[in-house]
Each structure stands twice: as structure tokens, then as C-alpha cells.
Image (cartoon, rainbow, N blue to C red):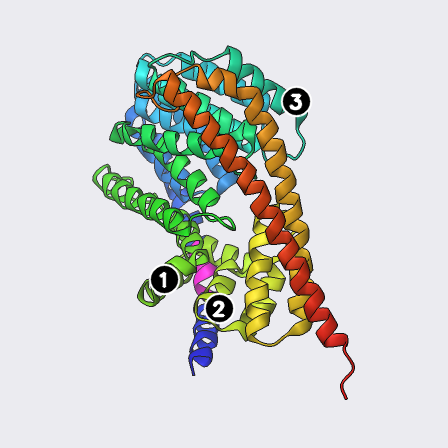
Amino acid sequence: MKRLNIIFTIILMLTMTLSASADSKSNKQSLIDKYSKQLKTTTSARDSVRILYYIFDLSDRRGQIKYAWDIYYTAGRAENINAQLDMLRNLGTFYANNDSVVEYLLKLTDEVSNEESRAATRTYIINQHINRKSRQPNDTELQTMLLDSITKSHNLEGKDIYDRLSLLYQIIQYLGVDADGVLFKECLDTYGELIEDLPVSDYPLKNQFYTTAAMIHSRMNGNPSKAIQYDRKLIEIIEQLQQMYIKKNRKFRNYDTNKFISYRRMLGNYPALTEEEIETIHDSIVALYNRNTDVKKTMDKEGQAHAFYYMAKKDYKNAIPAISGLLKNSDLSAYQKQKYYSMLIDAAKAENDSKTYISSMENYINFSKQIDSLRKVTMKREIMLRDSIISAPLLDKKTTPTHQLTNLEHRKTEQTLMIIASALAILLIIYIVLYVRLRISKPKH
């Protein structure tokens, strides 16, 4: 009965949005045309910024890139620094992979008169740029640039919180977000502590960190409870922003896609959710699916939310093809593949599907080996950075040099134990696979 209810929900979601999708797109375009006509007759730069924001919020990504520049320059004439900074951050996200445009955006940021706002926006743009560039595997140019910046471009003993945040983020990216060394975790935790000290107005930096931290803690052998905690913080900020924009009459600003991504990630951490929380999150996803065409397109194309919900509800028969579909995506990281194959192992075992169980176990072992290799790379990079980091009060302002050296010994011990534990785990998995194969191939009498 539960399985029928799940299937019925999905069918209902698919049918309810077929006509709504076309209507929504048509309505948005008619509104964009309406405000574009108003814009031509507006004489005040301040009113132009307000109307441009309407168009920006109604537009797709391509349209938003165009109108972001329009808002930036018009806001300059209106002496609206907040709008300019807002657009610089948006453009920093849109062009995060374009070195020359990012360099130009940073030049524009440096022209902002407010020192603190300038530093916060600059940090955000640089972080976005590094994050996007780090997704390209084996980018030695980026690694060289990061190492040079970490060791030469920052004041390791400085009190500037934005410089410390920038440095920590670069260390996290240099060590590799696909690895999880001890120094990596320490930098991530310290970054989280510093973020909480920032003013409310620095919500873009907070959102940036909460998203990164939620993704990292959502990995296999991560901390699902912590990941859910960060996603709840993201949704809380979104709710506050929505109220703020209502007061500012920015009536078309929509955060449905952002909410969907957080809810979907939370559902992927189902082992740390109660039955009631699973249903509440799923209901929120269904509501977003039914009212937002972008959410619908993403959900129909990628299918993660469906797969996670099947696993959360222990509907393993439908979970197996759903997760197998996810694994066809060639852009998945080793950590994502490891996690999905782990889900397949659980589902196949519950369904007595020996073929899927064995192939999933073999793939799980392969990606576990890849991740172990990443850990070794991380450890080498930690050794390169350790002298600089330990000699500066970067990770703990209250830590004395003696305590820092003691912590270093603890980290070495933890890293050694981690390698031994990983090796034992792989040997155990290999033993299980061989055992299952022998049992299947054993002739029956």
C-alpha cells in the first residue's frame, strides 16, 4: 500500500504541472515585456533600479546576466551601493569560471567606498571563483596559484576576519574538497566558527559556507546530522530574505530552487531523519515541484529526490532502478558514486538481488580506493602547509605553540589510524564479495 501511495504521488506531480509549466513561462514573459516598456519611460535612476530588479527576478539565467550589468551601472547613477554590491556578487557567481571577468569584477569591487562591504564582497567573489575552478580535475595551475596565495598573499597572523576567511577557504580548496584530511576538517570547523561572528548583512558569505559544508558533510562517512543542520540554516536565511524582499517590494524574488536543493540534500541524509521529518521534507519538495517550473525540470531530469525518498521509505524495489539511473551521470564525483553504490548495496541486499549486490560492491570498492588515493594527496599537501599554519594563530586564536604541537601529534596519529581503518575496511569488503560469489557459484546437490 505504501508503495502505491508513493507511485501515485509521483504520477500526480507529473500531471499537475503539465499545463502550469507553459502558463507560468508565458506569464513571466508578459510581465517582463510590461516592465520593459515602463523602463523606457522612467526618468529616475532610482525607479529604474526598482523596475530592473523586477525584470531580473522574472528572467532566466541568460536574462539575469544581461540585467545584472544594467542594474549595476544604473545603481551607480542612483548612488545605491547595496544594489551594486548585490549585482557584483551575482555576476561573481555567473562568471565564476571566467578569469578575466572575475578580475574585472574585483576591480569594480575595489572601487566601493565602504571598506567592510568591499572586503565581504571581494571574499565572496574570490571564493566562488576558486570553488568553480577547483571542480576541474588535476588543475595544476590552480593548485600552484592557491599555494602561492596561501603562503604569500595573506597575513597569517592578522586580525582581519575577511582575510582569515579567504585564507581558510583557499586551504580547504587546496587540500581538496573531495578529500577529508584532519587539517581540512579543522579549517572547515574554524571557518564555520568565524562565519557565525559576521553581521547579518553578510548572509551571502554565510550561505556560501553553509552550502559548501552541507555538501561535504553529506558525503559517505560524513556527518548527516551536521549536513541537515547547515541546510536548515540555509532555509532559515531564505525565509528571512523573503520577508526582507517583501518589505522592499521586490515581489518577484523567488527562492524555490534554493529551497529545493536544500530539501533534496536533506532527504539524501535520510539516516539522520525521523519518519515525520522525512514526510515533512518530501511534502515541501512536492509543493515546490507543483508551483515552480525550474524545480520541476530539475527534478524530472535528475531524479535524486525520488531515489532518496524511495530509500528513506525502504521501498527498495523502486530504489534500485532510481539509483542506477543516478549513476549514469558522468559528472558525479568519487564521493557521490561511493554513496550511491552504498545505497544500492543496501537496497539489493534487502531485495535479495545478488547480481546488483555484487556489481555494486565491486564498484563501491573501486571508488573507495580512489578516495583513499585522494586522502594520500591531501596528507602530502597538509605536510607542505603545516609549518605555516602551526606557526600562526589561524585555527585557534587561544591555542599556545605547545598545544599546537601536541595537536599536530594527535593529527598524525589520527591520519595513521584512518589509513589503517580504510585498508581493513577494503579487505573486509573484498572478503564479503568473494564469499558471496563462491556461494552463488557453488553447485547445488
- Give the CA separation, mark 1 to mark 2: 18 Å
- Asked whether the beta carbons under mark 2 and mark 3 sit within 8 Å of each other, the answer is no
Residue found at x 59% / y 47%: 422
How packed mark 1 is, by other alpha carbons closer than 10 Å (few <14, some 14-19, many 20 or more), is some
Instruction: Return the disc, 1 or 3, that comes first in the chain's sequence.
Output: 3
Q: Which residue is mark 2?
A: 310
Task: Identify the secondary structure beneath mark 3.
Answer: helix
Q: Is residue 92 visible?
A: no
Q: Is residue 205 above or below residue 26?
A: above
Q: Which mark is residue 141?
A: 3
Q: Which mark is residue 287?
A: 1
**Closer to us: 49 or 262:** 262
How packed mark 3 is, by other alpha carbons closer than 10 Å (few <14, some 14-19, many 20 or more), is few
Q: Is residue 3 visible?
A: yes
Task: Identify the secondary structure beneath mark 1.
Answer: helix
Residue 390's x, y, as percent? 45, 19
Residue 130's x, y, as percent? 53, 27
Question: Which amino acid lies under the numbered mark 2 shown in the image of this protein?
Answer: Tyr
Tell me if 440 is positioned left or right of 101 in this view.
right
- Give the CA separation, mark 2 to mark 3: 42 Å
- Asked whether the beta carbons under mark 1 and mark 3 sit within 8 Å of each other, the answer is no
**Closer to us: 443 or 288:** 443
Q: Residue furthest left?
A: 247
Question: Which amino acid lies under the numbered mark 1 shown in the image of this protein?
Answer: Ala
Q: Is residue 186 above or below residue 263?
A: above
- Asked whether the beta carbons under mark 1 and mark 2 sit within 8 Å of each other, the answer is no
Q: Tell me where the magenta segment starts and ends, as one range.
A: 18-24
Instruction: Return the disc, 2 or 3, that comes first in the chain's sequence.
Output: 3
**Closer to us: 313 or 247:** 313
Q: Which mark is residue 443?
A: none
Which quarter of the image is occupied by the N terminus?
Answer: bottom left
Tell me if 86 is positioned left or right of 320 in this view.
left
